[in-house]
Amino acid sequence: MRIGDLCSREVHVVEPDKPLLEAVREMHRQHVGALVVVTRHDAAAHPVGIVTDRDVMRGEITHNADVFSLAVADVMSGNLLTLAESCELAEGIAQLRHRGVRRAPVVDERGDLLGIVSLDDLLPAVAEELIGLAKLIGRQARRER
């Protein structure tokens, strides 16, 4: 199973130069805990970071400033993990685990944003594969009897 088949294609985005308050309001309005930070080239969006509700809190403390005086770029996580849409499920999970993140933007071969994948998207796919393995083991046990 490929990450591109599992990701959400509805991605909420913000540009790095936008006021942080605008991003916080968008997260609240969309009921999401993160926005993908993008730069735009023609019609395409290229992910350059991510801003989470946790980043907002940490940014306010780090900069000793409030949400009204900061920009998205001031608090976003810039060392961004992106996953190719062709990435297989196991590889995507391994990359998320290695980087210690819960979500990653999904990009095409040019690096343009296509979607976002989170642990919530991956858990049902992993569960489905485990169910398939359990059924296989059950069949083998019945054959051996």
Image: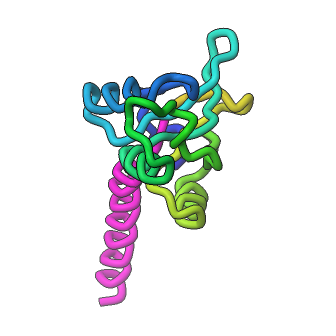
Can residue 6 be seen at all in this image of the molecule? no
Is 80 placed left or right of 7 in the picture? right
Is 110 placed left or right of 47 in the picture? right
The residue at the point 45 percent across, 48 percent down is 64
- Farthest-out residue, right: 110
Residue 56: horizontal and vertical position, in percent? 41, 44
Front-most of 138 and 95?
95
Magenta-colored segment: predominant secondary structure = helix
Residue 10: horizontal and vertical position, in percent? 40, 27
- Residue 22: image quadrant is top left
Can residue 25 be seen at all in this image of the molecule? yes
- Farthest-out residue, front: 64
- The residue range painted magenta reads 116-145
The residue at the point 38 percent across, 49 percent down is 57
Residue 126: horizontal and vertical position, in percent? 40, 60
Front-most of 117 and 72?
72
- Farthest-out residue, top: 42
Colour setup of the view: rainbow
Residue 141: horizontal and vertical position, in percent? 33, 84
- Farthest-out residue, bottom: 145
Magenta residue check for 134:
yes
Magenta residue check for 69:
no
